[in-house]
Amino acid sequence: MIRCEWVNSALEEPYHDQEWGKPKYDDEILFEMLILEGMQAGLSWTTILNKRENYRQALDGFSVEKISIISFSYICRG
């Protein structure tokens, strides 16, 4: 497969081949991408891909329903 020049790591290859540039219609996947794009501000996409599973764990699998009911005290639990 021919890949874009920005693909520089084994982590970027599956993202490029299976996700990048592919239309998304699933609300949960769109929400995940919205969150990741927001986290990316000022960082490289490679950094975000490296942290993606940590974000998934911290944000309850990017579940809109679960995130929407998180309380301030839960966030500040330290």
Image (cartoon, rainbow, N blue to C red):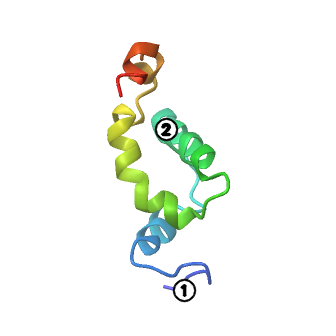
Q: Position of residue 54 (x, y in %)?
A: 35, 48
Q: Is residue 74 left or right of residue 41?
A: left
The type of residue carrying mark 2 is: Asp
Which residue in the protein does label 2 denote? Answer: 26
Q: Would residue 40 appear left or right of 17 to someone viewing this image?
A: right
- Residue under the point 41% across and 69% down: 14
Label 1 neighbour load within 10 Å: few <14, some 14-19, many 20+: few
Mark sitting earlier along the chain (2/1): 1
Helix, strand or loop status at disc 2: loop
Q: Quadrant of the C terminus?
A: top left
As helix, strand or loop, the secondary structure at mark 1 comes to loop
On the question of residue 71 being in view, the answer is: no
- Return the x and y of residue 32 as percentages of the image width and height: 49, 41
Residue at horizontal 57%, vertical 63%? 45
| Residue that carries the numbered disc 1 in the rendered image | 2
Is 27 drawn above or below residue 67 in the view shown?
below
Measured as percent of width and height from the top left, residue 27 is found at 51, 33
Residue appearing at x 56%, y 58% in the figure: 22
- As drawn, the residue found furthest toward the right would be 42
